[in-house]
Image (cartoon, grey):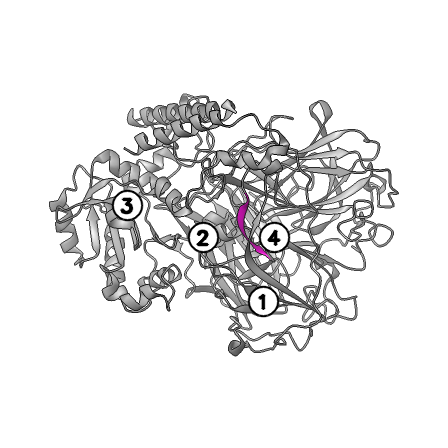
């Protein structure tokens, strides 16, 4: 036990040395150029992490002494939970209404626009409430107070199906969210919420717009028709199957308070199946079976929710950095709500759905095998949208809110142990440095032990798909229709504040631009900074990337080509993306999904209507 | 002072584990005894609100936590009197905000503008700046020992992670931080947000409308 105090003392000493060294460098008047020359500063503006120059974790350049370091916990000493599947309720009381039921305590202010066209077939009810949970193995940390959907984090998984082609509306559901959060927040969190379904093709009054928040004691009915984009426009009655989505999530989106509320637990998962991506490995695309989502002998499709957190070294309780505006990094890594858990698998293929809920970290995930070997796997989606076919990769990179579906094949690996390892170096909230660490040098997040019983595997072996077959899944929608308008969004920082196209943003009363319903737009995202990276998220529609710094998006390695809703805008990057805005109208945000940046007004609000505007730099 | 307190806390933490015997997995409850039961409000105070002695534009000495933050709804920004960049527009914006917030400023809502140049900005300079911006009671302009002001700036997160950017005062952080200390609700926004929008943001961290506090202080924002 003396280890703890020694560790803390050493950390403190390191921090003091680092702080002193930095102070001296700055006091000596060294310019960025000098530091670069001396090899102490990277081109990205980072001080080189030499001993004595920086101590983890760093949030500011000089006096980083105040950052908490979590108490030690034992890794790989508890099982990774499989996410609970939410069950529908027979009826809601009071019954849902098209107009907001203000009298009964509904916080919605806009009528449902597609309720009559897609009447809900199933109803769910979720209570957002406080609960006590354990995160560390062996009770090494005290019980943690969280805010969770139904009092759990991640929240319960909603598993739904699109309507069958030709009969839309069968997948339509209504989710009633109740705000039962307490006034006493235990140090952080705002008990005022709005729930975003990321990234459903959803009528926008049900999207979880950041300014459509509702208060304690109120409820809000979210109508999710679960229809394919194009259903009321380009592909009437059916929607475009090439717009099918698979791995979504829902989370609090309260304007200016999203980071603390999601950090406190308000995030859950949402899966959509259809007649191709069936959840049954004997049918359709034959992806590993979902089963009931719980039974390890029949459920081989597993959602994994990653986040990083810090625990107060004195109280052992979850800590949130209230005054940080750069981005918050944790030193404990959770999967499905547990710190460094273990997953037991059988020697066969699995579909893993990876989601990073932040708050600010980027991951590049590898599967580490025995003796520091790197195991390749198949990436099948970007942001939960199936690629044209599985692509063999050795890693996937994903920032906050990005999702990656993969197939990992443990056939013939019985008795072996693997790890999910993040090798992307990141030292502060500004984004990763760009360095990718060597095998075994990164952070082991999840242990995977192949000790389950041998079970049948009828799922597709991606290796058997002929190399000359270009499309195994749906293929991508075309990007040939001429855009109605090209808009540029330049993301900048000035006086420590975020600006888009040189203007401050983030005011709910400031709707900056209007998109014409059922039109095509081309957008250009620019980041002229060498120090910051931003996962830029657009609600409501998936985009396709046309070019990145003038080059076509990559189809191998770190995959860039695919349908996405988050663009990882890295250092000094410019991209062109292609959108079709179809079917529904209403307000939406375009924002950075580093939720700390988001909460400091890195968000532009817009709307879809039947007129549109011609602002090329909103 | 804060360093001293921190050191003593670390010493305490370092000593505490010696009293705890080596534990096995079966003795899980005892493991938790290494943690202290401290309220979140106290931890926030320890981490962010050192009780430094500051001086306002009238030359009054005030303790940062006990006199300025405790039990109040507060708004923070950093500025300096001879700033030719973003300070004046933000100060003008705060003057408008003070008008929008009305007579609660000075009662249970306070605006604090901390100087980035404590060596130049003595109380006289602050007073002059306050009068220039027609600051009314409840909006305080504060200076202190240079090391204390620097500590405060870092504690409250008015820092750029790039040291080159950070030491360039012409590009200093132009955000406002705001919060309700007893309710433990905190937020931040651009300093040039519209006063009406800032007032709305403050209402989110305000005391509940039906609370005794509000009845005593004349209603919500």
Question: Where does label 2 land, which residue?
Answer: A599
- Residue interval drawn in magenta: A143-149
* Residue A550 image point, x, y percent: 57, 44
State the image quarter where residue B89 is shown.
Answer: bottom left
Q: Please indicate whether residue B97 sits to the left or right of residue A244 in the image.
A: left
Q: Please indicate whether residue A262 sits to the left or right of residue A78 in the image.
A: left
Provide the chain ID for the residue under circle 4. Answer: A
| Image quarter of the C terminus of chain B | bottom left
Tell me the residue at 25%/44% (across/down). B64
Label 3 crowding class (10 Å Cα cut-off): few <14, some 14-19, many 20+?
Answer: some
For the residues tagged 3 and 4, is the chain the same?
no
Mark 3 vs mark 2, CA separation in Å: 25 Å
For the residues tagged 2 and 1, is the chain the same?
yes
Q: Please indicate whether residue B168 sits to the left or right of residue A528 in the image.
A: left
Question: Where does label 3 land, which residue?
Answer: B65
Please give the label number shown on residue A152.
Answer: 4
Mark 1 vs mark 4, CA separation in Å: 22 Å
Disc 2 or 1, which lies upstream in sequence? 1
Please give the label number shown on residue A116.
Answer: none
For residue B208: magenta? no
Query: Which of A336/B39 is in front?
Result: B39
Mark 2 element type: helix
* Residue B152 image point, x, y percent: 29, 40
* Residue A588 image point, x, y percent: 53, 63
For residue A146: magenta? yes
Tell me the residue at 71%/22% (across/down). A371
For the residues tagged 1 and 4, is the chain the same?
yes
Reply above or below: A228 against A339: below
Provide the chain ID for the residue under circle 3. Answer: B
């Amino acid at each position: 036990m003396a280890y703890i105090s020694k560790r803390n003392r050493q950390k403190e000493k390191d921090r003091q040395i680092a702080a002193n060294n930095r102070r001296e460098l700055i006091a000596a008047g060294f310019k960025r150029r000098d530091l670069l020359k001396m090899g102490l500063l990277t081109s990205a503006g980072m001080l080189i992490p030499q001993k004595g120059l920086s101590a983890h974790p760093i949030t500011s350049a000089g006096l980083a002494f105040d950052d908490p370091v979590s108490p030690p916990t034992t890794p790989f000493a508890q099982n990774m939970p499989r996410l609970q599947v939410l069950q529908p309720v027979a009826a809601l009381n009071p019954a849902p209404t098209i107009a907001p039921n203000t009298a009964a305590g509904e916080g919605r202010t806009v009528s449902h626009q597609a309720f009559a066209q897609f009447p809900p077939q199933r109803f769910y009810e979720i209570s957002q409430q406080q609960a006590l949970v354990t995160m560390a193995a062996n009770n090494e940390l005290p019980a943690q107070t969280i805010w969770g959907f139904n009092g759990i984090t991640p929240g319960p998984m909603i598993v739904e199906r699109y309507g069958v082609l030709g009969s839309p509306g069968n997948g339509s559901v209504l989710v009633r969210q109740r705000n039962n959060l307490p006034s006493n927040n235990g140090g952080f969190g705002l008990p005022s919420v709005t729930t975003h379904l990321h990234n459903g093709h959803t009528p926008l009054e049900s999207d979880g717009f950041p300014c459509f928040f509702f208060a304690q004691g109120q409820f809000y009915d979210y109508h999710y028709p679960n229809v394919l984009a194009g259903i009321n426009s380009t592909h009437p009655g059916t929607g475009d199957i090439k717009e099918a989505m698979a791995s979504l999530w829902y989370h609090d989106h309260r304007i200016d308070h999203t980071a603390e509320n999601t950090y406190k637990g308000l995030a859950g998962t949402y899966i959509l199946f259809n007649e191709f991506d069936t959840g049954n490995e004997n049918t359709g695309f034959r992806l590993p079976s979902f089963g009931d989502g719980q039974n390890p002998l029949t459920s081989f499709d597993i959602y994994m929710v990653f986040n990083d957190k810090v625990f107060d070294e004195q109280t052992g309780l979850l800590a949130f950095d209230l005054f940080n505006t750069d981005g918050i990094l944790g030193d404990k890594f959770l999967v499905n709500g547990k710190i460094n858990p273990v997953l037991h698998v059988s020697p066969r293929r699995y579909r893993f759905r990876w989601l990073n809920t932040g708050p600010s970290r980027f991951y590049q995930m590898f599967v580490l095998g025995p003796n520091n070997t790197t195991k390749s796997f198949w990436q099948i989606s970007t942001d939960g949208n199936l690629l044209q076919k599985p692509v063999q990769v050795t890693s996937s990179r994903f920032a906050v809110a990005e999702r990656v579906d993969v197939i990992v094949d443990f056939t013939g690996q019985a008795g072996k142990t693997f790890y999910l390892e993040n090798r992307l170096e990141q030292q502060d909230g500004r984004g990763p440095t760009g360095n990718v660490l060597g095998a075994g040098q990164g952070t082991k997040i999840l242990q995977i032990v192949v000790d389950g019983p041998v079970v049948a595997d009828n799922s597709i072996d991606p290796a058997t798909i002929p190399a000359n077959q270009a499309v195994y899944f749906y293929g991508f929608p075309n990007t040939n229709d001429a855009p109605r308008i090209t808009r540029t969004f330049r993301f900048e920082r000035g006086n420590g504040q975020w600006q888009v196209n040189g203007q401050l943003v983030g005011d709910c009363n400031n709707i900056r631009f209007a998109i014409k319903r059922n039109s095509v737009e081309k957008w250009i995202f620019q980041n002229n900074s060498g120090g910051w990276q931003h996962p830029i998220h657009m609600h409501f529609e998936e985009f396709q990337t046309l070019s990145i710094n003038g080059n076509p998006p990559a189809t191998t390695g770190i995959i860039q080509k695919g349908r996405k809703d988050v663009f990882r805008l890295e250092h000094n990057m410019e991209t062109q993306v292609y959108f079709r805005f179809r079917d529904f109208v209403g307000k939406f945000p375009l924002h950075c999904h580093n939720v700390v940046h988001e909460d400091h007004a890195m968000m532009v609000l817009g709307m879809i209507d039947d007129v549109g505007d011609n602002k090329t730099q909103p | 002072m804060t360093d001293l307190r921190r050191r003593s806390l670390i010493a305490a933490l370092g000593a505490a584990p010696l009293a705890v015997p080596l534990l096995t997995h079966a003795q899980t409850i005892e493991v938790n005894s290494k943690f202290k039961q401290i309220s979140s409000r106290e931890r926030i105070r320890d981490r962010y609100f050192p009780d430094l002695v500051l001086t306002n534009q009238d030359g009054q000495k005030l303790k940062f936590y006990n006199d300025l933050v405790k039990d109040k709804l507060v708004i923070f920004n950093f500025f300096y009197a001879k700033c030719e960049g973003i300070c004046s527009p933000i100060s003008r914006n705060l003057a408008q905000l003070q008008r929008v917030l009305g007579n609660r400023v000075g009662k249970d809502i306070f605006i604090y503008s901390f100087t980035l140049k404590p060596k130049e900005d003595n109380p006289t300079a602050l007073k002059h700046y306050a009068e220039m911006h027609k600051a009314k009671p409840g909006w305080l302009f504060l200076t202190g020992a240079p090391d204390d002001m620097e500590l405060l700036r870092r504690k409250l997160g008015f820092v750029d992670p790039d040291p080159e950017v950070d030491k360039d005062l012409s590009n200093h952080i132009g955000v406002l931080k705001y919060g309700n200390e007893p309710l433990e609700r905190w937020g931040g926004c651009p300093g040039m947000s519209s006063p009406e929008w800032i007032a709305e943001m403050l209402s989110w961290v305000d005391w509940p409308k039906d609370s005794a506090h509000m009845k005593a202080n004349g209603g919500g924002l």
